[in-house]
Each structure stands twice: as structure tokens, then as C-alpha cells.
Amino acid sequence: MKRISWKSPSNIALVKYWGKHGVQLPSNPSISFSLDHCYTETSIRLEEGGTGIQSFHFEGEAKPSFIPKLQTFLDRVSPMLPWLSGFGIAIQSKNTFPHSSGIASSASGMSALALCLADAHAAMNGGEIDMQLASELARLGSGSACRSVYGGYTAWGETPHIPGSSDRYAVPVLDVHPEFRDLQDTILLIDSGEKQVSSTVGHGLMDGHPYASARFEQAKDHIKRLKGILETGDFMDLADLIEREALTLHAMMMSSNPHFMLFKAGSVAVIRSVMEWRAKGEPISFTLDAGANVHLIYPATYAQKAMDIIQAEFLGFCQDGAYICDSVGKGPAKIS
Ligand code: PMV
């Protein structure tokens, strides 16, 4: 069979997923938006008569150390793709963002691979690619990856506030105010070092965490609030909510057993400064992933002023002055 290639974006969660059960099922619902510039391009070649992952190349170089993780993913998805047993898979992948940036590539990487497999599934059975299947496959690789198969805003996890939502796959959130459809995300690359704790370990530390159930209830309530805010387009309400979410995520890490802290001094300095700017009425806010980098979130209409603030105040906190200007993206695309 010929080569199949897809590009798929990274995403940034506004209400965070942290804590899971069963096979990659979330302990609370989450909402993110897909990024426009940070994505992974992946090609697969199916080799008839082979079995399992035959090779993995990242940015042109063979990376056999990735194969066990990819094979685990393949073993998980194979019951949903019965034809897979008759094929081996050779994978090639590359990112548009530097892998030393500290930006997690699991969401874009796993969603791009899942899209290739869902597309192959459509080719085997005839018909169009099923995005719900692609999302479910992506989830089995990395939870947050299931939200990357759509553009714009996406929800994952069952919630009464989003019809059709599920723990098994993500769904698009379509009712979004025009003000938020081109929201900006400037990622300040504060620290590019290896993560101190993998997200798998971090999720696991929510088991038995003394504040876990309160956190899961808070996230459910935040989904309801965020859904309303996305409809009305009030940026200051959004800022208040996403900052609380980001700080709660890190508070969960700082209060787990063992505890850990992913902020760097630069992250804290930027966060404080953003809070001060907003207290003066400026429409700029932040969110964080499980790392030290700070995502500055602001409306497109505020981009010039935000860039002035970034240049004047934040570049000194970025490693080698590096940052990535991104925004809400249109989602994955097939590469012909
Ligand atoms: O998909 P994972 O297992 O890498 O978990 C990602 C968790 C956060 O990025 C911290 C939050 C989220 O919802 O994306």
C-alpha cells in the first residue's frame, strides 16, 4: 500500500486533564484549542506480510529507542483495526517546533500517527476517514492527543454541558465567539530541559492525592463556566478561569506525594507580571502545560501591545530569548 501522511497540531488545554483511570480514560473533562504552527508531520508505509513497528525515523534519523512505546500503542489499537495484523509499519516523523523547546510533542505526534492509521482503515474498508475513530486511537497513545484531531476548540471527557461528549474521544466545540476564534498563544520558552517528571507519572500521582476529588469537581464546574465564556467572548472572564486552571494543575503537582515543582524562576516572574498587567486592565493572561514554559494568551486585536510587553519585559526570561508565536489553528490536514 502506498504511503499515508498527515500533519497534526499540538494543543493547549484551558481546562486541564490531570488524572486518569482504566486505559487512558480521563478523571475529568478538559477543553483545549489546537495550535496553528506547532505540529508534527508523520508518514506511514504499510508493509504487507510484516508485523508490528518495523522502523521509526525522526527528522530523518533512525530512532529504535522509540519503537517499544510505539509498539505498545499499536497493541492497544489493534483490536479496533483488525487488518493491522497482516501488516508491518514503517514510520517517519518530524516536528515544526524544535524538540529541545520543552513543548510536549506527544499530542501532535500521537494524533498524526492516529490520523494515518484511521486513514489507512478507511482505505481498507472503503469510505471517508472517521475523525471520531482517529480521536479514540490518538487517546490510546496519549490522552491529550485525542483533542488534536480537530481545529479550533475541542472537548474531551463526558460532561452534561457538551452534547455528544465522551471519555473515549474528543468532540469539537463549535459555539465560539468570533473574538476567541483567533486567540493568540505566544509560548515563552523559559526552559528547554528534560521534564523532571513524565506526564504518566504525574497522572499516576493523582491516585490517592488528598485533593484529587475536589480538583475533579472543580474541573467539571470549570467546563460549564468555560463553555459559557467561549459563547459570550468575555476575555477577562476567560483570563481569570484559565489562570486558576493553570495554577491548580501545578498546585496538584506541588502537593502530590512525592511532590515536584516544574516552575522555574522565570516562569514565576512572567506570571506575576502578567497578573499585574491585567490588574491594570490589559487583556493578557497565561496558561501552563506540565512544564516551565509560559503560554501567553491574548486577543488578536491586542497583538501589537502584547509584543511590546514581551520584547520589553519577558525576553530576558526565555532561554536564548526564544519564543513561538502561535494562535488557534484549523486542525490536521492530509499531506498528499
Ligand atoms: O496527554 P498527556 O498524558 O501528556 O497529559 C497532558 C496533560 C496536560 O498537558 C498537563 C494537560 C492537558 O489537558 O493537556
Image (cartoon, rainbow, N blue to C red):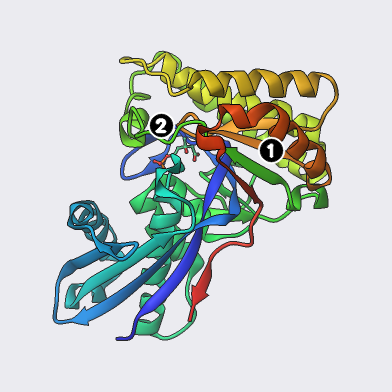
Residue 297, numbered label: 1
Is ligand 1 closer than 8 angstroms to the Cβ of mark 1? no
* Position of 100 relative to 42 (above/below): above
Q: Quadrant of ligand 1?
A: top left
Viewer-side residue, 282 vs 224: 282
Question: Which residue is located at x 50 percent, y 27 percent?
Answer: 216
**For residue 180, side relative to residue 135 (left or right):** right
Is ligand 1 closer than 8 angstroms to the Cβ of mark 2? no
C-alpha distance separating marks 1 and 2: 24 Å
The residue that mark 2 highlights is 19
Please report whichever mark, 1 or 2, sits nearer to the chain's N-terminal start: 2
Question: Which residue is located at x 31 percent, y 66 percent?
Answer: 60
**For residue 149, side relative to residue 117 (left or right):** right
Q: In which quarter of the view is residue 270 placed? A: top right
**For residue 243, side relative to residue 165 (left or right):** right
Q: Badge 1, how many Cα within 10 Å: few under 14, some, many 20+?
A: many
- Estimate the x, y position of residue 295 in percent, counting from the top left: 60, 36
- Estimate the x, y position of residue 157 in percent, counting from the top left: 51, 44
Question: Which residue is located at x 78 percent, y 24 percent?
Answer: 278
- Estimate the x, y position of residue 110 in percent, counting from the top left: 38, 56
**For residue 67, side relative to residue 145 (left or right):** left
- Estimate the x, y position of residue 327 in percent, counting from the top left: 66, 50
Q: In which quarter of the view is residue 119 placed? A: bottom left
Viewer-side residue, 273 vs 121: 273
Q: Is residue 198 visible?
A: yes
Question: Which residue is located at x 74 percent, y 39 percent?
Answer: 307
* Position of 271 relative to 97 (above/below): above
The amino acid type, in three-letter code, at marker 2 is Gly
Q: Is residue 242 visible?
A: no
User: Quadrant of the image for the N terminus?
Assistant: bottom left
Circle 2 sits in a helix, a strand or a loop, which is it? loop
The amino acid type, in three-letter code, at marker 1 is Ile
